[in-house]
Image (cartoon, rainbow, N blue to C red):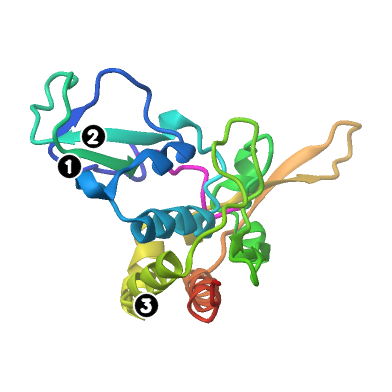
Amino acid sequence: MFETATIERPLEGAVFDGGDGWAWWELDQVDPQRGGASRAERDALILLAAFLQHTDSKAEQQRLLCLGEPAERPATTCAHPLLMLNDVGLTFGAANFLNDNGMGSANFRAWSAEPIWKDRARCVADLRPSFSGTLSNPRVGEAGRLLLAGLLQRLSDRQLTDLFDVSRMAQRRREIAVPTASELPGTAFVGGTPTAEWVRVFKEKRDAIATARCA
């Protein structure tokens, strides 16, 4: 018996045979002249990763999917590649060198304390490096910032509330050390943060993107 269950509805396509995903620096190899994403689209994705505090950004966490290929087996050719984030379990916290789960995953206090920008004037996003990561403190252009800001602003308060509710963020409990009568420390769980607070911080971070300007 499980208290909760999740269902993933995957995109139709096959995982590319020949790699473990893609590293963030490989986005520079995408060619818009051959049907690839524009620089603005790639920068928007990069800024979104910083928004989420995607700390464990090793290649395995990003998937290269071949659209239109049968999913039963890996694809050896890829006429229509799609680069996507596949595993974002360590997000909505604070990026950290060791990819600590307590700090990097669904930690309201840590996420709310992280700014969007490390250097707002130069549009350098705040994302501390991790030992496994392939993305840290990235610089983005104005077109990418503007694109992501527009997409995030489409989300209504109801949609944001649903996002955090269905993710059960308010039920996420943290284990803390407490003193005991013995010499050994004990542990206890403290309750999660209300959904409304997650929504509030999400909107603050969205505003930080929308009000910036990149040279």
Residue 210 is left or right of residue 183, and the answer is left
Residue 178 is left or right of residue 114, and the answer is right
**Residue placed under numbered mark 3 in the picture:** 153
Amino acid type at mark 3: Gln
User: Which label sits on residue 11?
Assistant: 1
Secondary element type, mark 2? strand
Secondary element type, mark 3? helix
**Residue placed under numbered mark 2 in the picture:** 65
Residue 22 is left or right of residue 55, and the answer is left
- Indicate the position of residue 130 as horizontal and vertical percent values: 64, 37
Amino acid type at mark 2: Leu
| Depth check, front residue: 129 or 4 | 129
Q: Earlier in the sequence, mark 2 or mark 1?
A: 1
| Depth check, front residue: 195 or 40 | 40
Q: Residues within 10 Å of mark 1 (few under 14, many from 20)?
A: few
- As for residue 90 lying within the magenta part, the answer is yes
- Indicate the position of residue 99 as horizontal and vertical percent values: 62, 37
Residue 38 drawn above or below residue 57:
below
| Depth check, front residue: 172 or 77 | 77
**Residue range corresponding to the magenta coloring:** 86-93
In whole angstroms, how far apart are the C-alphas of marks 2 and 1? Answer: 9 Å
